[in-house]
Every structure is written in structure tokens, then in C-alpha cells.
Amino acid sequence: MPNRLLPALCLALFTSGAFAQADQVTAEADAPTEKILLVGQRPGPGLWKVSKDDHVLWVFGTYSPLPEKMEWRSQQVEAILAQSQEYLEPPTAHAKVGFFLGLTMLPSLIGVKKNPDGATLQDVLPADVYARWQPLKAKYLGDDQDIERERPIFAAQTLFSAGLKQAGLSKGYEVGRKIDGIVKQRKIKVTETGIKLEMDDPSRMLKEFKKSPLADAACFSKTLARLESDIDAMRVRANAWAKGDLEAIQKLSYADQESECGDAMLNADFVKSRPGFQNIKERVLAAWVASAEKAIAANGTSFAMLQMADIVGPDSYLSALKAKGYQIDSPD
């Protein structure tokens, strides 16, 4: 995790966990084996079309992980962006802390990733889970003793990132960066679609976080499960996205650790006591839908980027628009 303030720390976990990939929880027992990852330019999937009368919102679905050596380029996306009057950023939940307040909090960040009271992973994890951790740690992280004192949620994130890299996969951030570059180059109006979280006392929240235990053993265990049994299937899904094969993506279920890791933060005591941090998923969805409706009403053509799970998952953002009377057309 980047060395930022607690609000950014928490929210990075909220957005990567609570709003991340599909909420599928069953590991694919017979996942196909795929050792070769696609390279070169690839288009990804087509665009979803949300329309009312002659006004259209085009939606592009992002995915993670992706082949590390793949270069994403979609002529369809570039053409649609060239016609668009507004770009809706991906939905997030975030909080802002003033610069000078941030400086005063920096000393308190020391040890923020560590377990309370000097506990180690062996102290806080079930014995069978810790036994599974040791060979994976040796494989992906080597002899890293410092990580043994980190909270399971942070150790899991570090391990998973290392596992992806060794498997030739990346988080796929370059897709978003490329779209942002096109938007900036064409000077398209940019609209934030998320929510701001109220923080009355960030310093106190930081202190409470450092002292509070987290129910993050499930997050840790499911992260191990992904690396133990899902690497080949990750390659299949990554290639499927690169080729635009949505059917292949949807056929493969997996033990999703992201929702477990997000819940570990969202259900922690230092969050439960703060009204402004409640019902985040529902509020983010509602904020995005409201932004989408405004964009569709105001523009002939608009463009939005969502994670694939927010398009085809059980809590689809597009289903919420369909319920309001909008026409939804999937890619060909």
C-alpha cells in the first residue's frame, strides 16, 4: 500500500474490495489450463449501449488481472470517445484530508500496517491457514520476515500482487490510464460519479484503526485459495477479456477474496461507529446511476467506464438503469 493517510488507506481497500470484481464465491474445480498469455495489441470487450430516445451512454467494462505484456487498444472506444460530450469516471468512495492536517498525521502512520500489540501472522491466524501461507510466501515473497508482523489483510494484498506478477499478469491499470489520456487529449468534460465520506476526526480514526483487530482471516484464507488453485483460470479470464470473449469470462467462477477483504474493513469497529461510512455500496451505486441519468439527458453521446462485475454481476449498475426504463444493449 502507498504510504498515505488512513482515509486513503481504508478507501483503497474499500474500492478494491467492496466494489471490485464479481462476487462469485465458488472455485472452479475444472478450470481449463492456459499457460500462454496474449501479447501485442488487444481490443478487450465491446461496449454496452444505454439509450433513451436519441441519447446514448456507452459503457466500457474493465477487468483485472490482465496479461502483463498485452497492449490495450480499441478503435471502437477511441471512435466513441471522439463523439462524446461527457466522460463518467468509475464510481468510488473517497474522503479528503487537508494538506496541513495530513502533515501533522504523518508520524502516526508509523506501524499502521502492523498487527496490534506486536502480534505476528502466526499469532492471529488459524494454524491450518498459517501452514498454507508458508509455502506460498516462500514461492512469491522469499525470506521476508517483516511481513510476518503485518495484518493479514495487508500481507494478503502483498502476496497476491507478487503472485500475479510471477504469473505474467498485471492489475490492468494501464487500460484506465489510456482512456484518461484520450479524455484529456480531447478535452472531454469529466464527471466524478462516486461519493465523499464524511470524516470529522481523521487523527482519531487513525488511532482507533491501529488499536482495533480486524476480522480479516477469511480475506487472507481466500487469497491463499486463489493462488493455490486459480492461477491458470486467471490466465483464461485475462485472455478472454483481451479477446472480448465475455461468455468465457462469465462461465468461470472463482473464490473471490476481494469481497471478503472489503468486508473486513467495512465491518470493523472503527468504521461501524461512523454514520458517514455506512451503506457505502448502495450509496455509490445510487450516485453513479444519478450521474448516468444526468449525462444521458444532457448529451447526445456520453461514455462511462465500469468494472465488469458492475455490468454483468448480481448487482449490475446497468440493471438499475434498465429498471428506470432505459434500453440496454449488450455488445455483439
Image: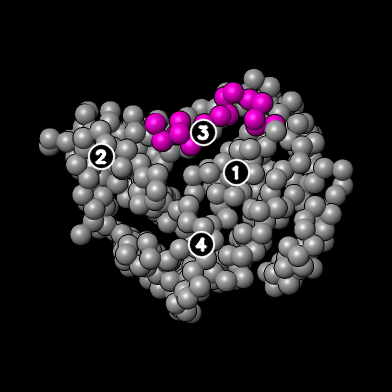
Task: Give yes or no for contact between labels 4 and 1 (Cβ–Cβ under 8 Å).
Answer: no
Task: Give yes or no for contact between labels 2 and 4 (Cβ–Cβ under 8 Å).
Answer: no
Specify the principal SS of the magenta part. Answer: helix
Q: Nearer the viewer, mark 4 or mark 3?
A: 4
Q: Does residue 5 appear in the picture of this structure? A: no
Give amino acid for label 2.
Lys
From mark 2 to mark 1, how far is it between C-alphas?
A: 28 Å
Name the residue rendered at 38%, 34% in the picture: 288
Name the residue rendered at 49%, 69% in the picture: 28
Residue range (magenta):
270-286
Give amino acid for label 3.
Ile
From mark 2 to mark 4, how far is it between C-alphas?
A: 28 Å
Q: Does residue 199 appear in the picture of this structure? A: yes
Q: Is residue 171 above or below residue 151?
A: below
Q: Residue furthest top?
A: 200
Mark with earlier residue (3, 1)? 1
Q: Is residue 224 above or below residue 285?
A: below
Side of 172 relative to 77 (left or right):
right
Kind of element beneath mark 3: helix
From mark 4 to mark 3, how far is it between C-alphas?
A: 25 Å
Mark with earlier residue (2, 1)? 1
From mark 4 to mark 1, how far is it between C-alphas?
A: 18 Å
Which disc number belongs to residue 25? none
Q: Which residue is mark 3?
A: 280
Name the residue rendered at 35%, 41% in the picture: 317
Side of 229 relative to 296 (left or right):
right
Side of 269 relative to 56 (left or right):
right
- In x, y percent, where is residue 104? 74, 27
Q: Which residue is mark 4?
A: 26
Give amino acid for label 4.
Thr
Q: Which residue is mark 2?
A: 322
